[in-house]
Image (spheres, rainbow, N blue to C red):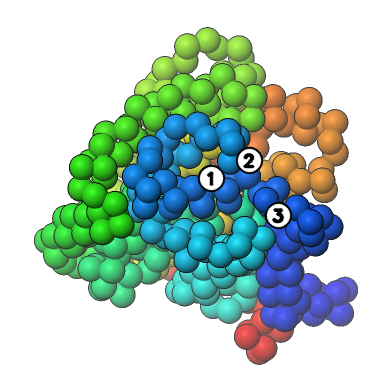
Amino acid sequence: MQKLKNILFNKTFILSLWFGLSFFAVAKDIVLHPSNKLTTHNNYIIYKHNFLNLINQHTLFGPEPQYYFDLNHYGPVFGLVIAPFAVLPNQAGVIIWAMFLAFILYYAVMQLPLNNSQKFVILLLNVNSIMGSSGNVQVNPLITALVIFSFIFIRKKQDFWAALMIILGTAIKLYGIVGLAFFFFSDNKVKFILSLAFWSVVLFALPMLVSSPAYIIQTYRDWYPDLLAKNAANLTSTRGNVSVMGMITKIFLVKNLSNLLILVPAILVFGASMLRIKYWRNLNYQLLLLASVLIFTIIFSTSSEPPTYVIAFIGVSIWYVILDRPITGYERFLMIFALVLTNFSPSDLFPRYLRVNYVIPYALIALPCLLIWFKIVYEMLTRDFSKKAGVLKIDNLENKA
């Protein structure tokens, strides 16, 4: 057992899984079908045309079936982010993009104020998530990293850069705005607010350098109805709306469920968990809020899909590694439940019959994360953070990291 533990929790082994499986997931079709000049990764082609449409001042949100199926829902700033990859040949660009996403999330996790054991356990728990995300070349690892960076910069009293992370994440995909939850940990809130205003102006104007002011203003006007249309489509989608609202709608066959009936109580509960002001400077309390934010963002969003849960599962993993040791039977059950249903069910590691007939139709991927989110809120409201807690520590990682 100790020998197996030494293998599983070896730094080189974990990093080989993290980057090796990410590379395999994105490159396998290209290697198997090298003559396919247009890579099969449709999402990447959408991202690339965000940049191409930006510089050619074509609408970002209209259908382009001659290039890709589905629609682009990312703002003009994303065109600048994808630009270095978009100028490359498709097959090279898509691989480098996926590896960049794997690296940026890895780097963000490694910057967390945790010990080496905790960081590498987070990576190990999310190997399957990053592999699935890489296979879909999803932008979600970048959004996760930006939220984490906003948390880290605020803790380091670097509010100016924290504000950049929040505005950049929001400008790419609205999920990034949740970094504002860390505002209360800032020691210089005026500077933080001014920094948010500064970066909002800069990132609004920056795409104008490769297009025009009139085009960018019109693009932002077009973005809002596009997001509304996307939300409406998610509500009737089989694979979309993998959220608490979607779960209730699909399990109980509730028609025309108002999102506010779920969102308002959830926001109130979330807000209540932040009221213990005396612990705002406590690291474990702050990390629990980070975990809560990452999970909340996904489970209460009708835009959530299975690949989006890489964001939530990083939050689940942060919660797990900062639990008081030894953990309880219920906490162990929650973690295993989340691994099986949230992490593995979208993949081939899970029985296809159960996935197709139960997990996807009833949005059950959200269920373990909802239970864990409730547990996090309970801990934030009741835990005595002044006591020294037992900490996850694996000697092999501590010695070799």
Residue 371: image location, x then y, percent: 57, 39
Q: Badge 3 is on which residue?
A: 37
Q: Badge 1 is on which residue?
A: 46
Of all residues, the one furthest to the bottom in this rendering is 399
Q: Residue at x 42, y 17 (%)?
A: 258
Image: 8 above or below 357: below
Image: 155 above or below 377: below
Of labels 2 and 3, earlier in sequence is 3
Q: Amino acid at mark 1?
A: Ile
Residue 14: image location, x then y, percent: 71, 73
Residue 294: image location, x then y, percent: 47, 50
Q: For mark 1, does the 10 Å Cα neighbourhood hold few (<14), some (14 to 19), or many (20 or more) residues?
A: many
| Structural distance between the alpha carbons of marks 1 and 3 | 16 Å
Query: Disc 2 vs disc 3: which is toward the camera?
Result: 3
| Disc marking residue 306 | 2
Q: Residue at x 64, y 65 (%)?
A: 92
